[in-house]
Amino acid sequence: MKIGFVGLGNMGAPMAANLAKAGHEVTGFDMAAVSVEGVTMAASATEAAKGADVVITMLPNGDILRRVAGEVIPAMQTGAVLLDCSTVDVQSARDVAAQAVAAGLHALDAPVSGGVGGAAAGTLTFMVGGGDDGFNIAGELFDVMGQKAVHCGPSGNGQAAKICNNMILGVTMIATCEAFALADKLGLDRQAMFDVVSTSSGYSWSMNAYCPAPGVGPKSPADNDYTPGFAAELMLKDLRLSQMAAEAVDADTPMGRAARDLYAQFVEEEGGKGRDFSAMLPRFETRGRG
Ligand code: NAD
């Protein structure tokens, strides 16, 4: 396929490289001067989009997505697919999709889980919103860039799935970290705590697969001085998106709100920026109740 790829950062560059390696003809554009193996660089987003069967965007936020979509949609050929893989607010995803569909295009919002490692290895999970036709056309690209693509319903539902998942993740990580810190103060050994919880009703991905306590459980960023992994500021971004969505539809999400507030404090006031999101454990360790 002929693919335009806009946004070749930490995630976009390895995704585009994998598409080129699989034999697709990829033309890329990024505001920054970047080069990606196998990808022909264009002078603008519009130029990258011209004549493409699929235009993929991998951008920082909804405002930038809206801007880029405004440029590329008029340049795209009828029947082509606009495939946005960024994590953005649900409303931006829905507005951009409506604009694309009105211009005779297919539109998909397909945020990913799996991080930079998953992007490089081609093992991302895509959560996809949009029509069946677009989903079928993009299917072979999901197979190259990822290991799983779940069609979640109409436009915006991919973003909805992503922020609901990450709201659960943020909340369970905080719960796991505060429980470890409580266990410490009660004199309970961390290994014993892990052995019990990971096989009892308190288990979760945060405990079992990404244990925030160094030297306990599987290898995780905790074993590498909390070098991300999944940075706390990216978790904060997703928690903010989940609260923005909850406000828009009047959903009561007290735990999600508390998680957002804690990560905001951690990132903005307590040196959490640039640390893995599981570094909530050393944060709790040093605190008392007041
Ligand atoms: P990044 O900042 O490394 O990459 C974004 C790229 O977009 C940059 O290279 C930037 O120069 C480019 N860009 C910005 N404005 C542009 C414009 N107007 N035209 C063209 N290019 C422009 O970010 P990333 O880590 O690659 O993340 C991309 C998206 O994926 C974000 O929405 C993020 O939330 C999501 N995401 C990231 C991860 C992760 O672990 N990094 C995991 C899952 C999802």
Image (tube, helix red, strand yellow):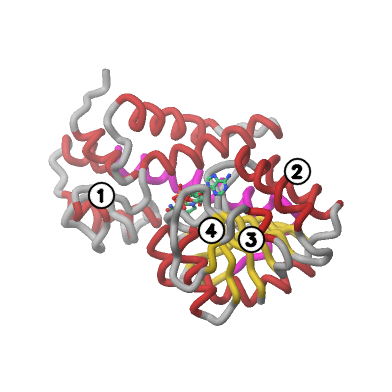
Alpha-carbon span between mark 1 and mark 2? 36 Å
Q: Classify mark 4 as within 8 Å of ligand 1 or not, answering yes or no.
A: yes
- Residue 13 percent coordinates (x, y): 46, 61
State which tag comes first along the sequence, 3 or 4. 3
Above or below, comparing residue 107 to residue 225 in the picture: below
In the rendered structure, which amino acid carries the disc numbered 4?
Val
Can residue 179 be seen in the rendering of this structure? no
> Residues under labels 3 and 4: Cα distance?
22 Å
As drawn, the label of residue 48 is 3
| Label 2 environment density (alpha carbons within 10 Å; few <14, some 14–19, many ≥20) | some
Residue matched to label 4: 112
Specify the farthest residue to the top. Answer: 290
Is 157 covered by the magenta stretch? yes
**Badge number at residue 227:** 1
**Distance from the alpha carbon under mark 4 to that under mark 2:** 20 Å
SS at circle 1 = loop
Which range of residues does the magenta coloring cover? 149-178
Q: Locate the C terminus and report the quarter of the image it occupies.
A: top left
Q: Which residue is mark 2?
A: 95
Q: Position of residue 17 (x, y in %)?
A: 47, 70
